[in-house]
Amino acid sequence: MKKYLFLCFFVLTSTFVSAQSEVIVAGDNVCLRLRPDEGSKLTGSQFPHFYTGNILSCTGQVNGYYRVVYDGHTYYLPKRYARPRGTSGYSSSTPVAFDYIVIAGDGVCLRAQPNENTKLTGSSYKHFNTGEYVECAGVVGNYYKIIYDGRYYYIPQKYGRPRN
């Protein structure tokens, strides 16, 4: 009987994950692993770090880790830092009823993620000024998710006004 229950659990879990093609990161500054263990954590500024709402392709599960693909390579992400996409009720951005954001401030910096720790400062990054329009892709927390130069960025809601 135990073997039968285990087999049913295994089949259900495998079916769920194999049908699942993406996971949403549920944590900030999350590092990938080379293998499904904590000893192979990729730390340091030369490695990518992920934030709540980032979406990664998922190819399965191994020992409490999601097997994910990033930049053409396979890595592992602890399950405690990710949720299968579409089952948690969480979305990387809330759909909006408007298409654009008009900037309400001068020298507004883009953010790589929806938080102040990822502000893109310096002369090599675009800074927006009052009256400029940017395309809006959604809302994440207190940030507008915008599209600029073909990529997603974030700006605090206090520096933007929705427009159609």
Image: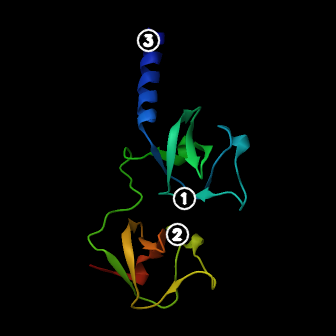
Image spot of residue 47 (x, y percent): 68, 57
Q: Residue at x 60, y 49 (%)?
A: 72
Q: Is residue 120 left or right of residue 21?
A: right
> What residue is disc 2 on?
115
> What residue is disc 1 on?
51
The answer to which image quadrant residue 1 occupies is: top left
| Marking on residue 3 | none
Marks 2 and 3 close (CB-CB < 8 Å) = no
Q: Amino acid at mark 2?
A: Asn
Image spot of residue 108 (x, y percent): 50, 85
Question: Viewer-proximal residue, 10 or 146?
Answer: 146
Q: Is residue 5 above or below residue 71?
A: above
Image spot of residue 145 (x, y percent): 42, 69
| Marking on residue 4 | 3
Task: Give how far apart the Cα atoms at labels 1 and 2 are.
Answer: 9 Å
Q: Amino acid at mark 3?
A: Tyr
Marks 1 and 2 close (CB-CB < 8 Å) = yes
Neighbor class of circle 3 (other Cα within 10 Å; few <14, some 14-19, many 20+) is: few
Q: Is residue 101 left or right of residue 40?
A: left
Q: Is residue 90 above or below residue 77?
A: below
Neighbor class of circle 1 (other Cα within 10 Å; few <14, some 14-19, many 20+) is: some
Question: Viewer-proximal residue, 157 or 134?
Answer: 134
Task: Give how far apart the Cα atoms at labels 2 and 3 are.
Answer: 47 Å
Q: Residue at x 62, y 82 (%)?
A: 124
Give the position of the C terminus as an image quadrant: bottom left
Secondary element under disc 2, as helix, strand or loop, is loop
Task: Give how far apart the Cα atoms at labels 1 and 3 are.
Answer: 39 Å
Secondary element under disc 1, as helix, strand or loop, is loop
How was this image coloured?
rainbow
Image spot of residue 161 (x, y percent): 34, 82
